[in-house]
Image (cartoon, grey):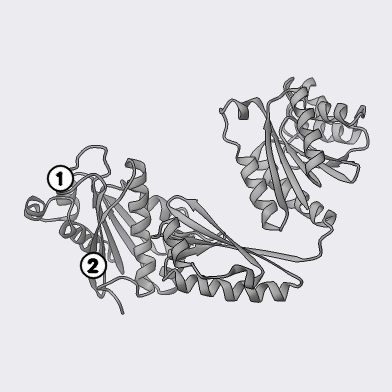
C-alpha cells in the first residue's frame, strides 16, 4: 500500500514549528510495511489544500492528513475537504454533545467557535479523539482512503497508534509479515559502519538495511518481509547476529531501548552502584541517567566540580596534581573517578573533565579535548578523546561516552579493566 502524508499549517510553511508529525507518521507507517511515497506540507489555504488532496489521490492508495481541524478561522481542513470531494458539511450531533460535555467537565462554557469542530463532510467516518476537542474523520473515494487527523502531536500520536494503523492494516491488500529492528550504534561513523557491514547481502534474508544518522548515535534499521511471522523472526535473528558481530560491541541499544536504560539494567542486575564527578559536562551525565525510572536503585550521586577550587574542596583532588598536570588531564579524571567513588561508597565512579569550548583550548589541549575515567573494584582506567563539534556537541558526546564506558565495563570491553 502506497501512502502519502499531508501536513497543514502556516506555522509549518513559515518555519515557526518543526514538522514532527510527518516524521512520526512516516516512521510509524513504514514500521508496519507501508510505503510512504510522498510527504507534502501546505499552508492554510483552500486552494493549496485542495490541490494537495487531488495530487495525493492520484499517487497513493491511502492519504493521511494532519492539521487544520481546530476551532479558529484558519482551521479550514474539514471545510476544504468537503469542497474538494463535492460534499456538504453536516453537523454531527453526537460529536457536538461530546464537546459540550468536555467543557462542562472542565467547568467551562463552550465557546461558540468550537461548534465548527462538529461539522464534517457528509458520509465521513468519525474518529473519536479522547485527548482533545478535534475528532478525526475518514473519507473514501474511488478506491482511495483519506484519513484526516488533528495536528496536536500528542493527540495525533495516540490516534495513529490506536486507530489509523489498525485501519490501514485492514485496508491493505498485501498478505505478508513485516518486521523491523533498529540497532543503535555509538563509536563508529556512518561510513565506518557501512564498511564493516560490506559483504552482507540483506536480500538473502528478504531484508533491506538503512543507515540513519541520529547524533550522537548512528542507527542501522533492518526491515524484513516474509510469508509468515516465524520466517521473518528467524531471518531477523540471523541477520541481527551477523550485524552485531561485525560492529564489535558498538551496538548500545535496539528499537525503543536507550543507552541509559541498558546501563541501568546492567547496574541493577550486577548489584552495582554508580557515582559521577562531572566537570565539562556540567551535570549532563546525571540528567541522562536519571531519565530512567527507578534509577535511584543504582545511581547514587553526581557532583559537578566545574572549577579547580571545587575539585579540590569538594573531592580532595590534590592541588599539586592540578598544577602539574592541568585540570584537563587523565590524572585528574582518574582522581575525580576514584574520589567520587570513595566518598559515595559506590561500586563504580566516573570522572569527566575537558574543554567544551568555544574558548579555553591550547595547542597542546585544543577545544574538544576530554578525559574520561572509570574507577572500579578492578582498578582505574582513563582515556583522552578529541571530540568534534560545537560546545553542545562536545558536551553531549562526552556524556554519552562516559555512560557507554559503564556498559562496556560490564561487557569486558574496556582496556585495562577486563575481568
Describe residue 187's horizontal placement relative to residue 122 as left or right.
left
What residue do we see at 36% from left, 45% from top? Answer: 393
Position above or below: 330 against 84: below
Task: Identify which residue, 211 or 99, lies in the foreground.
Answer: 211
Position above or below: 38 against 314: above
Describe residue 294's horizontal placement relative to residue 330 as left or right.
right
Does the image show residue 109?
A: no
Position above or below: 104 against 179: above
Q: Percent x, y for residue 81?
A: 83, 30
Rendered image quadrant of residue 321: bottom left
Q: Which residue is mark 2?
A: 381
Q: Percent x, y for residue 347?
A: 31, 69
Work out whether mark 2 precedes mark 1 in sequence or the reverse, and give the earlier one: 1
Task: Identify which residue, 75 or 248, lies in the foreground.
Answer: 248
Number of other residues with Cα within 10 Å of mark 2, as a class: few under 14, some 14 to 19, many 20 or more = many
Disc assigned to residue 25: none
Amino acid at each position: 500500500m502506497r501512502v502519502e502524508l499531508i501536513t497543514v499549517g502556516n506555522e509549518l510553511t513559515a518555519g515557526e514549528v518543526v514538522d514532527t508529525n510527518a516524521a512520526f507518521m512516516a516512521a510509524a507507517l513504514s514500521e508496519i510495511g507501508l510505503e510512504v511515497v510522498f510527504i507534502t506540507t501546505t499552508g492554510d489555504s483552500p486552494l493549496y489544500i485542495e490541490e494537495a488532496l487531488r495530487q495525493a489521490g492520484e499517487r497513493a492508495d491511502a492519504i493521511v492528513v494532519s492539521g487544520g481541524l481546530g476551532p479558529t478561522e484558519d482551521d479550514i481542513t474539514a471545510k476544504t475537504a468537503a469542497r474538494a470531494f463535492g460534499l456538504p458539511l453536516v453537523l454531527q450531533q453526537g460529536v457536538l454533545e461530546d464537546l459540550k460535555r468536555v467543557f462542562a467537565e472542565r467547568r467551562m462554557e463552550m465557546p461558540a467557535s468550537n461548534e465548527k469542530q462538529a461539522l464534517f463532510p457528509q458520509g465521513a467516518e468519525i474518529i473519536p479523539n479522547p485527548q482533545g476537542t478535534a475528532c478525526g474523520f475518514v473519507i473514501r473515494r474511488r478506491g482511495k482512503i483519506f484519513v484526516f487527523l488533528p495536528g496536536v502531536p500528542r493527540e495525533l500520536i495516540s490516534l495513529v497508534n490506536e486507530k489509523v494503523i489498525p485501519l490501514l492494516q485492514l485496508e491493505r491488500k498485501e498478505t505478508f509479515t513485516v518486521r523491523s529492528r533498529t540497532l543503535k550504534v555509538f563509536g563508529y561513523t556512518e561510513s565506518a559502519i557501512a564498511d564493516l557491514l560490506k559483504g552482507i547481502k540483506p536480500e538473502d534474508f528478504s531484508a533491506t538495511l538503512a543507515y540513519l544518522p541520529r547524533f550522537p548515535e548512528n542507527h542501522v534499521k533492518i526491515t524484513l518481509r516474509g510469508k509468515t511471522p516465524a520466517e521473518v523472526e528467524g531471518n531477523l535473528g540471523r541477520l541481527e547476529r551477523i550485524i552485531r558481530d561485525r560492529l564489535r560491541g558498538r551496538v548500545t541499544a535496539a528499537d525503543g531501548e536507550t543507552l541509559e536504560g541498558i546501563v541501568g539494567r546492567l547496574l541493577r542486575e550486577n548489584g552495582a552502584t554508580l557515582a559521577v564527578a562531572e566537570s565539562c559536562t556540567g551535570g549532563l551525565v546525571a540528567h541522562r541517567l536519571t531519565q530512567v525510572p527507578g534509577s535511584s536503585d543504582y545511581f547514587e550521586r553526581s557532583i559537578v566540580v566545574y572549577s579547580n577550587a571545587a575539585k579540590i574542596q569538594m573531592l580532595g583532588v590534590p592541588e599539586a596534581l592540578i598544577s602539574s598536570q592541568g585540570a584537563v588531564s587523565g590524572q585528574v579524571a582518574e582522581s575525580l573517578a576514584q574520589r567520587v567513588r570513595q566518598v559515595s561508597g559506590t561500586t563504580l565512579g566516573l570522572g569527566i573533565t575537558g574543554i567544551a569550548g568555544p574558548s579555553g583550548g591550547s595547542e597542546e589541549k585544543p577545544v574538544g579535548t576530554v578525559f574520561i575515567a572509570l574507577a572500579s573494584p578492578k582498578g582505574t582506567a582513563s582515556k583522552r578523546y578529541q571530540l568534534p563539534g560545537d560546545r553542545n556537541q562536545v558536551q553531549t558526546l562526552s556524556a554519552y561516552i562516559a555512560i557507554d564506558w559503564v556498559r562496556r565495563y560490564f561487557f569486558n570491553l574496556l582496556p585495562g579493566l577486563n575481568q
